[in-house]
Image (cartoon, rainbow, N blue to C red):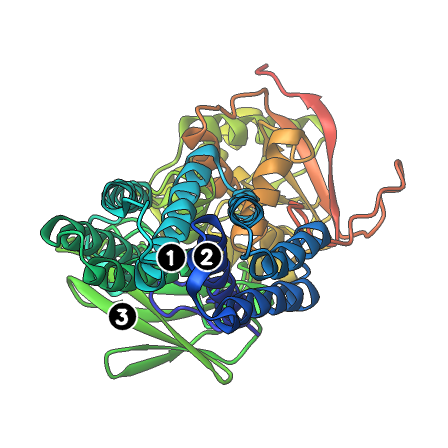
Amino acid sequence: MEDMHTHTGVPGVDLLALVLRVLLLTGTALTAGIGLLRAGAVMRPSFAWACGGATAALAGLSAVLLHINTGFAIAHVVLALAVPLALRWRGPSAFLGFGLALLLIAEAALGHTSLNFFLDTIVVVVAVVWSGLALAKTWNSDGGLRPRPIALTAALALLGAGTGQLLLSGLFDRRLLSTGYGIAVLVVVLGAAVVLAVTLLTRDDVRVYRYGAIGVLAVVLAWGALPGIPLPHDLPVPGVARLAQTAGTPVLVSPHRAGKNLVHFPESAGQGITVKQGGTVARAVPRPGASGTWAEVDLPAGRSDLVIRKGEETGTVDVDTGELPEIAGAARPECASAALGALAAGAPTPVSCPDTQLLPEDADALRKHVAFLAEVRAPSLSVVGDDTPRSRAAADVVREEATRRGLPVNDSPEGALVLVSGWEKTSHVLERAQFVYGMHVAPWLLHGPVVTSAPGVAVPLRFDPRDRGALTYGMTQASAFGDPPSLSGYRQWARARGESLAGEVTMYASAQVNVMQMTGHQHGGNHGQWIPQGTIVAVSGPLTEK
């Protein structure tokens, strides 16, 4: 398994690819410079052959081990060997060196944006020119070449490219010095500045090209390493759930405030994960009604680190709670799911816990749900809630509407069970409850691990879990973290995208089946599906007030 960068929380460097890229870039620039400026006219042929041969070998090795484009690799080998072969002739050697430089620029362009390509081109050209200048000044003193204006222009261009890369990175904070990517960008900028200073302060002297070439080499090495170094995550923001990746698994820290927090891992992470905060170690364990595992930790005010251990892998997640006080009851899986929906939509903003209030649209859905039960002639209702503000208000709404409809509210299993509690309690109740008129849950309980606690449940919804928007949210969240969808997360996702879940209330029923009998589609997977290993279908038309 790949190593993880402990503070960025993203997959680490592929060391082999990084070394080959840096060596190939450096060797190609040197060989192209020798040919382009004909530095080897009076130098030992062995040096040119050593550069060309090493570059050809690296190109061939890259083609075999890294599966790079075969056409580029063959052209690279041919040109690298042709440069030392043609050094006796001024024209052919210059054209071959120029061709090798163009090939290097084309290879750098693969998978890059136009701006990245432009910056790569500048660095490659400067590396080639400075390599040639350093060698030409050292071994070729027959005159005819005025290298200082060329060197000064190249040094200015290199500093411009380095500054552009810094602006693109956006690392104007502590990540510039605390992450591998930031340090590499800093080396590029400072190295380019040193090369320019040496060029300005030193006259047409052999030392300017010797010392300057060392600075250019440092810049080229750092630049070549950038694609292989993980991009650092955004800095943690107090009160915004922290999503990172370390020790081979995604990690979600919520609510990311001082006090009690949940550290969540997806099902794919497996079991046996521990979280260390200060001197306290917490084990991540499953929770009823939620997927994956959860560790409960107490975070101090300000910045700190969580040490994640998964088997033999260890990593850290940096957190920053600032001075925000603890919010009682915010460390719940449903609260974390709501925050994850916002993060999946690319909107890392503070998210309040959904169980702090009953939304008007949910109250309306519950009233229509009770009306639906009255229409199917359920003899009675049994209402189960908890002590959260949302649940207490929802229980009142259900009882009031039942009274208005003439439905008795009691505990008789001959009627229907209506659950308006949170995920955990609902999951416990569904596992053992049996009611003749079925199990009915509030809209916010549409979450796979909750509803699959029973063979089937009914839920009033204002959207179709099978439509494109709902599935897009589910697949995006599954890709970002691995959790199944939830209504709380979907609402945050839709809000971040400027969308609304404001359709007519319709009754849906979930069932634990692997095949949709009506369509033949397989639903055995978990990627983006609202009911893993199951299905959900509409069992009514839009419900209206009567």
Q: Which quadrant of the figure contains the N terminus?
A: bottom right
Sequence order check, earlier mark of 3 and 1: 1
Q: Tag 3's secondary structure?
A: strand
In the figure, residue 78 lies in which quadrant? bottom right
Sequence order check, earlier mark of 2 and 1: 2
Question: Which one is nearer the viewer's eye here, 189 or 478?
Answer: 189
Residue position for label 2: 34
Between the C-alphas of marks 2 and 3, the distance is: 50 Å
Q: Is residue 392 visible?
A: no
**2 and 1 marks in contact (CB < 8 Å):** yes
Which circle marks residue 305 in the picture? Answer: 3
Residue position for label 1: 131
Mark nearest the camera among 3 and 1 is: 1
Q: Position of residue 237 (x, y in %)?
A: 25, 50
**2 and 3 marks in contact (CB < 8 Å):** no
Q: Position of residue 91 (x, y in %)?
A: 54, 44
Between the C-alphas of marks 2 and 1, the distance is: 7 Å
